[in-house]
Amino acid sequence: MTSATGRGPKVFFYVQHLLGIGHLARASRIAAAMVEDGFTVTMVTGGTPVAGFPGPGVNHVTLPAIVSGDTGFSGIADEHGNPVDDAFKARRTALLLEAFATAKPDIVIIEAFPFGRRQVRFELLPLLDAIARAEPKPKLLTSLRDILQERSKPGRDEETVTLINGHFDHVLVHGDPSFIRIEDTFPLANEIAGKVIYTGLVAAPPPAPPAERFDIVVSAGGGAVGRDLVLGAREAARTLPRLGRWCLIAGPNLPQADYEALTADLPEGVEVFRFRKDFASLLGGAHLSVSQAGYNTVCDILRGRCRSLLIPFAAGGETEQPTRARRLEAMGLARILAETEVNPQTLADAIRAAHALPAPPPYTLDLDGARRTAAILRELA
């Protein structure tokens, strides 16, 4: 556990990332805004460590890491890929409850649950019980991205409503209601409407001008599911040499063997990176962004105001990224290529077409969600 202190209310923030790093990145932006506002923030994370997160000034508690067993989030495994057993779950639960008791927070924020993260109910339901017994009892909030995954199993939405109404004081929706509202992806939103607070999109602050310029920036988010995108882009670049300089960002979670295959025999004008801290800045100087349609990547694209080709992640019945991409396309802010259609030729054709588009039209989406979240929490405390 790393340690830091602040002047204001104490916040206990639980974040469990299972596949990519998007949830952790968004939560870290929110935590940074709270620290800047004088809060004492304890963040508990339970995924594989990611360098640079959650960031300075945050008390960081790490639970034994778990990951998704597959891209459909049907199970969990430890960081070595082994299924977790009851002893492992009991150890995590005990560590989580100990961290809560030590922090003595004024506010508890649980990222995604109960709208998602059912895989960790084994530790979150005991945490809800501990919160209910605490004296004084902290306020309890859930922290959600703007678009929820569609539920395929009956009764799940009803169970979510029961938990929200039985335990949670508020539902923070990190989105702009003029873009999409919670009722658009959560059918029972009217049953919790009085608890919903929109914060705006949690984008990074406006970046500095780029220190390096690329004409086309291709990114695969965390990289766990972006192999076909970056490999396809490398081959597309061979047929599109006149489009300028290319930057391929593979992501920290792309398997090493795939990364080595990607970096072999690069076309002229193409550079490959695992990660770029200045990603948002690069978009500000780029002619075109090619990426998946994850929350944080899209926020960076909106900040950069560059042309965008989106290949939304849809494996395992995922609906969140396709929904976001369609909304952006309807606003004239992106073009879409389906994930199942990606190959070097289709990707080259789509990149050529998107590159030829005029600059994106103006928009007024609220991107200041991190700072607004801190302000909302200060009012609640």
Image (cartoon, grey):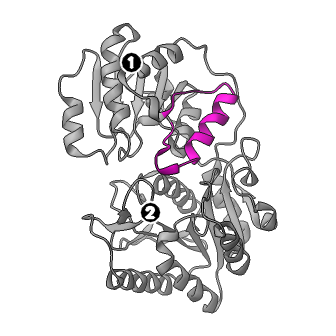
Callout 1: helix, strand or loop? helix
Q: Which residue is mark 1?
A: 345
Could you say which is closer to the camera, residue 116 or residue 145? 116
- Up/down of 91 relative to 194, above or below: below
Could you say which is closer to the camera, residue 24 or residue 158? 158
Q: Earlier in the sequence, mark 1 or mark 2?
A: 2
Q: Which residue is mark 2?
A: 74
Q: Residue at x 31, y 24 (%)?
A: 234
Q: Which mark is residue 2?
A: none
325 in the magenta segment: yes
Q: Residue at x 47, y 13 (%)?
A: 352
Image coords of residue 283 (percent x, y): 48, 28
Could you say which is closer to the camera, residue 259 or residue 133? 259
Q: Residue at x 81, y 62 (%)?
A: 190
The stretch in magenta equals 312-338
Q: Residue furthest top?
A: 242
Image coords of residue 217 (percent x, y): 41, 26
Amino acid residing under circle 2: Ser
Callout 2: helix, strand or loop? loop
- Give the left or right position of residue 255, taking residue 207 as reference: left
